[in-house]
Image (spheres, coloured by chain):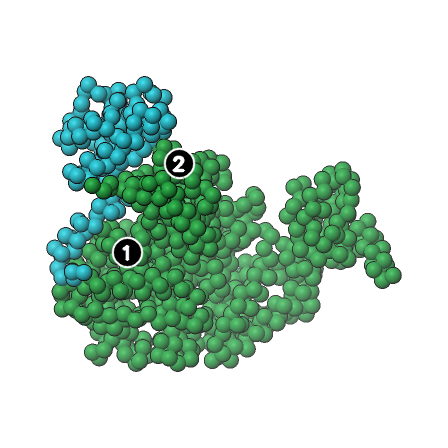
Chain colours: A green, B cyan
C-alpha cells in the first residue's frame, strides 16, 4: 500500500515570496524528493503569505513547525538530506534575531510572530489557498453553515453589532450598523461588495489575505449577503493583483462545485453568487462611492454621500460595502461569538487588525495585532527596532493620506479614535517607520505628489489645492522658499480638508498638517536656515569630513560612486564639493561619524571649501 | 463532486479531509524516529516507513517525525513517543518488525517496559 506522507513542507507562493523566487525552490524541492524516491513520504504544499515577506522565500516543515527563511534552490538538497531524512535543524537557514543574535528555529517563537495575535490571518500561510479542501479541513465554512442553517439574518446582524466590529478599511464605521441599514433599506435587489482596491503605497494586507485565504473572505461575504438579503456580490480587486484575482477565481469555482456558492447554498434555500471585477488601479476607486461608480462602468469619481450607499449604492440599490479584512473577520465572530471578539482590542475598537509594517524596521511584513497596542510595541517588539541602531523619528500610518507621528507619541494606543485625534488615521493598514535620516518635509512632499496624481479632479479644492501645496513644498525643499510659505501651506491644507467632498480630498492634507504639527521646526530650518537636518533635500545640504574624527579608512572612498572623495590611507579624507551630488553614500558607509551633514552655506571658508573652490577653477579651466 | 447540503455533510467532508492537514495540527501524539547516521545504519528508515504504514492502516492520528543522533547509538533505532498526557517514553532497538507491536500498545495507551531506554518522570 502507498505510504502516507509523514511530513508536510509548506512553501509560500504569494506575491512577496514569488518575487524573491519561491517558484524555483518549489521545483527544486519536488525534483529532489523524486530523485530520492521520497515523493510519497513528503507532501509539498504551496501555501499563502506568512506576512514575513522581508525573509522570503519562507518554508515550514511539519510536524514541528521548523521555519526556514530566504531559501534558495541551492539549499534544497541540503534541506532534504538534513531535515527531511535526518531530522536535523539547519541552523544557517533559521531566522536569526537581529537584537539577541539568537537562532530561532520554530516560527511561533520568533518575536515578530510571538507578539502577534492572528485571527484574520489565522489561515494565511497554513493552508493551500487554491484548495477548498484544506480550508474545510481547517474548519472552513462552519460559520456559513451555522449562519444559514441555525440563525436568522436578524440574529447575525445582532451578533455583529454586539461584537463592536468596525470597518477595517480605515474609517472605522460600525459594520453591524451598516448591515442593519442595508437590511432595512427598501428594495428587493441588494448588493454586497468587497473592497479589494488597496491603493496605499506600501500596504499589501488585503492583497495577501485575498491571495492566502480567499475562502475566508468569501465565507464572510456570503454570511453578510444572507444577513442583509443580497443575492449578488462583487469582489472589486485592483488589476495590479493578478495572483489575488487568480486565487479568488479558483475559490469561487471550488465553492460552486461544493454547493457553497450559487443556487440553494448548503440546501438552505439561499441563492447568492459573486463576480470579480478588476479595478484599473486608480487610488480614488478605493473610496466607496467612486468604487461603485467604477463597478457600474462609469468614471471612478466619488459622489455626495447625503444619500447613503446602504440606501442607494451600486446601481442605486441598497449596497453593503466592506473591506477585505472586515469580511474576513466575520466567520470568526460567527464561530466564536461577539463576547469572544470583544475580549480583544479596546472598548471602542474591539478585535484585531493587520498592518503592513515597512520602512526602517528590522522586521518588516504583515503583522496582526489587537487594537490598542502601542506604537512602541509595534515598532520595537514586533518590528525589532530600527536597523543599524538608528534613532526613531516618526511613524507614518494610514497610507498617503495618513499622518506622521513623532517619538513622543510612541506610547499612543493604536485604534481608530486615538489615531484620528493625533492627526493621523488608521487607513487600510500601512505603517512606515522612519529614522533620523528621513526628512519630514520631503516625506510630505512625496505623499502630496502621489495624491496630486491620484486626485480625480472633481473638486477644485483637491485638484488645485494639492497642486499648489506641492509647489510650495517643492520650493521649500529646493531652497527657494519665500516668507509666508508655511502659513499659506497651512491655510491651503485647511481649505482642502474642509471643502473637498470625498475622503481622499478631506484627508489629503494630513501629511502636511501632521508634519507641521509635530515637526514645524524642521520646516523652519528649511526656510530660514536653508538646511535639511536629515540630509535628504540635496539642494540644501553638503557633506563634510570632520578631520579630527576621520581615521582615513577609505570606506567612504569605496562607497562614493562619483569618485568625489580623495585621501590616502590613515590620512583624513576630503570631499570634492563640485563632484559631490549629496547622495549620502559616504555618510552611510562611515563607521566613525566622521561625515557630517551641513548646510550648503557652511562649506565656504574651511579647508573643504577652499578645495571646492580650486576644483571649480579646475573645472572652469 | 457531491454538493454539501447540510451541516452533517460538511462535517463528514471535514472528517475525510482532515488527514491531509493533520500534520499542521498538534494532534496530541508524536512519534519521533532517530534518523542520525547511527539510526539509519541500524535500520531506522525501515522502521520509519513501517511506522507510517502501520499508523495509516489503523487510521490512527499521530504525527511521525524524525530527529538526529542523541548519543545513545547502541540503542538505535530509537523511537520516542510524546503524548499530551504522559511523559515521553524512549524505546531502543525498534526495528521494523517490532513496529506492529509498538503501535498496538500505543493504541492501548500502554508502555512496553522491556524496550524502554529512558522514561522521564
Mark 2 closeness class: few <14, some 14–19, many ≥20 residues within 10 Å: some
Q: Position of residue A354 (x, y in %)?
A: 38, 55
Tell if the residue under mark 2 belongs to the same chain as the one under mark 1: yes
Residues under numbered marks 2 and 1 in contact, where contact means CB atoms less than 8 Å apart: no
Residue A357 appears in the picture as rendered: no
Q: Is residue B44 above or below residue A40?
A: above
In the image, is A38 to the left or to the right of A537?
left
In the rendered image, residue A288, in percent from the top left (x then y), is placed at 37, 72
Q: Nearer the viewer, residue B33 or B62?
A: B33
Residue in the picture at 69% in, 43% down: A555
Q: Residue reaching furthest right?
A: A621
Q: Residue at x 85, y 55 (%)?
A: A614
Q: To which residue does mark 2 refer?
A: A81
Q: Is residue A256 left or right of residue A350?
A: left
Query: Residue A299 location, x and y as percent?
Result: 42, 80
Image quadrant in which the N terminus of chain A is located: top left
Q: Tell me which residue sits at (32%, 33%) in the image.
A: B66
- Image quadrant where one finds the C terminus of chain A: bottom right
| Parent chain of label 2 | A
| Rendered view: A74 above or below A352 | above
Mark 2, secondary structure of its residue: helix
Q: Residue at x 47, y 43 (%)?
A: A74
- Quick check: A546 left or right of A500? right
Residue behind mark 1:
A131
- Give the quarter of the image for residue A81: top left
Q: Secondary structure at mark 1?
A: loop
Q: Residue A300, can we see it?
A: yes
Residue A609 locus on image (x, y percent): 80, 53
- Towards the viewer: A37 or A7: A37
Please report, as a chain letter, where disc 1 is located.
Answer: A
Amino acid at each position: 500500500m502507498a505510504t502516507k506522507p509523514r511530513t508536510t513542507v509548506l512553501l509560500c507562493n504569494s506575491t512577496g515570496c514569488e518575487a524573491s523566487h519561491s517558484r524555483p525552490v518549489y521545483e527544486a524541492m519536488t525534483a529532489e524528493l523524486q530523485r530520492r524516491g521520497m515523493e510519497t513520504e513528503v507532501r509539498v504544499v504551496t501555501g499563502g503569505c506568512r506576512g514575513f515577506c522581508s525573509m522570503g522565500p519562507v518554508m515550514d516543515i511539519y510536524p514541528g513547525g521548523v521555519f526556514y527563511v530566504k531559501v534558495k534552490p541551492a539549499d534544497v538538497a541540503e534541506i532534504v538530506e538534513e531535515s527531511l531524512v535526518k531530522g536535523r535543524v539547519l541552523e544557517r537557514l533559521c531566522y536569526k534575531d537581529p537584537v539577541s543574535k539568537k537562532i530561532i528555529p520554530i516560527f511561533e517563537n520568533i518575536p515578530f510572530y510571538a507578539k502577534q495575535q492572528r485571527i484574520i490571518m489565522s489561515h494565511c500561510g497554513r493552508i493551500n489557498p487554491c484548495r477548498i479542501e484544506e480550508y474545510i479541513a481547517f474548519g472552513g465554512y462552519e460559520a456559513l453553515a451555522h449562519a444559514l442553517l441555525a440563525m436568522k439574518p436578524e440574529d447575525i446582524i445582532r451578533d455583529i453589532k454586539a461584537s463592536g466590529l468596525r470597518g477595517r478599511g480605515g474609517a472605522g464605521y460600525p459594520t453591524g450598523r451598516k448591515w442593519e441599514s442595508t437590511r432595512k433599506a427598501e428594495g428587493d435587489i441588494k448588493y454586497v461588495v468587497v473592497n479589494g482596491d488597496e491603493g496605499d503605497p506600501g500596504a499589501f494586507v488585503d492583497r495577501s489575505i485575498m491571495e492566502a485565504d480567499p475562502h475566508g473572505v468569501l465565507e464572510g461575504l456570503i454570511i453578510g449577503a444572507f444577513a442583509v438579503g443580497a443575492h449578488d456580490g462583487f469582489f472589486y480587486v485592483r488589476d495590479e493583483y493578478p495572483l489575488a484575482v487568480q486565487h479568488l477565481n479558483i475559490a469561487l469555482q471550488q465553492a460552486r462545485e461544493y454547493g457553497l456558492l450559487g443556487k440553494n447554498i448548503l440546501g438552505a434555500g439561499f441563492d447568492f453568487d459573486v463576480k470579480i471585477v478588476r479595478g484599473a488601479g486608480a487610488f480614488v476607486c478605493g473610496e466607496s462611492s467612486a468604487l461603485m461608480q467604477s463597478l457600474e462602468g462609469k468614471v471612478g469619481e466619488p459622489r455626495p454621500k447625503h444619500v447613503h450607499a446602504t440606501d442607494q449604492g451600486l446601481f442605486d440599490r441598497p449596497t453593503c460595502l466592506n473591506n477585505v479584512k472586515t469580511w474576513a473577520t466575520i466567520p470568526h465572530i460567527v464561530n466564536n461569538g461577539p463576547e469572544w471578539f470583544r475580549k480583544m482590542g479596546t472598548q471602542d475598537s474591539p478585535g484585531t487588525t493587520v498592518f503592513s509594517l515597512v520602512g526602517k524596521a528590522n522586521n518588516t511584513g504583515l503583522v496582526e495585532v489587537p487594537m490598542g497596542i502601542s506604537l512602541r510595541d509595534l515598532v520595537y517588539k514586533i518590528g525589532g527596532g530600527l536597523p543599524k541602531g538608528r534613532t526613531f523619528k516618526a511613524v507614518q500610518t494610514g497610507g498617503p493620506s495618513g499622518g506622521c507621528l513623532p517619538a513622543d507619541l510612541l506610547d499612543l494606543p493604536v485604534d481608530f479614535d486615538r489615531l484620528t485625534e493625533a492627526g493621523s488615521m488608521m487607513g487600510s493598514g500601512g505603517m512606515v517607520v522612519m529614522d533620523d535620516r528621513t526628512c519630514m518635509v520631503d516625506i510630505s512632499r512625496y505623499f502630496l505628489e502621489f495624491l496630486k496624481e491620484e486626485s480625480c479632479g472633481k473638486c477644485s479644492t483637491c485638484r488645485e489645492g494639492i497642486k499648489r501645496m506641492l509647489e510650495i513644498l517643492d520650493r521649500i525643499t529646493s531652497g527657494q522658499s519665500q516668507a509666508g510659505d508655511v502659513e499659506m501651506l497651512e491655510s491651503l491644507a485647511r481649505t482642502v480638508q474642509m471643502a473637498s467632498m470625498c475622503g481622499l480630498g478631506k484627508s489629503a492634507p494630513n501629511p502636511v498638517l501632521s508634519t507641521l504639527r509635530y515637526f514645524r521646526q524642521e520646516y523652519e530650518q528649511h526656510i530660514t536656515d536653508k538646511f535639511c537636518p536629515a540630509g535628504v533635500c540635496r539642494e540644501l545640504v553638503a557633506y563634510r569630513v570632520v578631520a579630527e574624527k576621520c581615521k582615513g579608512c577609505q570606506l567612504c572612498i569605496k562607497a562614493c560612486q562619483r569618485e568625489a572623495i580623495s585621501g590616502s590611507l590613515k590620512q583624513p579624507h576630503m570631499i570634492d564639493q563640485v563632484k559631490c551630488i549629496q547622495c549620502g553614500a559616504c555618510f552611510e558607509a562611515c563607521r566613525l561619524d566622521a561625515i557630517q551633514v551641513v548646510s550648503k552655506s557652511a562649506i565656504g571658508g574651511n579647508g573643504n571649501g577652499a578645495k571646492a573652490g580650486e576644483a571649480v577653477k579646475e573645472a572652469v579651466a | 463532486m457531491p454538493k454539501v447540503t447540510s451541516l452533517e455533510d460538511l462535517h463528514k467532508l471535514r472528517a475525510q479531509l482532515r488527514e491531509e492537514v493533520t500534520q499542521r495540527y498538534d494532534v496530541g501524539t508524536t512519534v519521533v524516529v532517530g534518523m542520525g547516521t547511527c539510526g539509519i545504519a541500524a535500520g531506522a528508515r525501515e522502521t520509519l516507513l513501517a511506522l507510517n504504514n502501520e499508523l495509516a492502516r489503523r487510521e490512527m492520528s499521530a504525527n511521525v517525525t524524525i530527529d538526529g543522533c542523541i548519543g545513545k547509538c547502541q540503542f538505535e533505532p530509537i523511537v520516542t513517543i510524546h503524548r499530551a498526557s504522559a511523559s515521553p517514553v524512549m524505546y531502543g532497538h525498534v526495528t521494523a518488525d517490532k513496529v506492529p507491536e509498538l503501535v498496538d500498545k500505543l493504541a492501548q495507551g500502554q508502555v512496553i517496559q522491556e524496550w524502554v531506554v529512558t522514561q522521564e518522570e
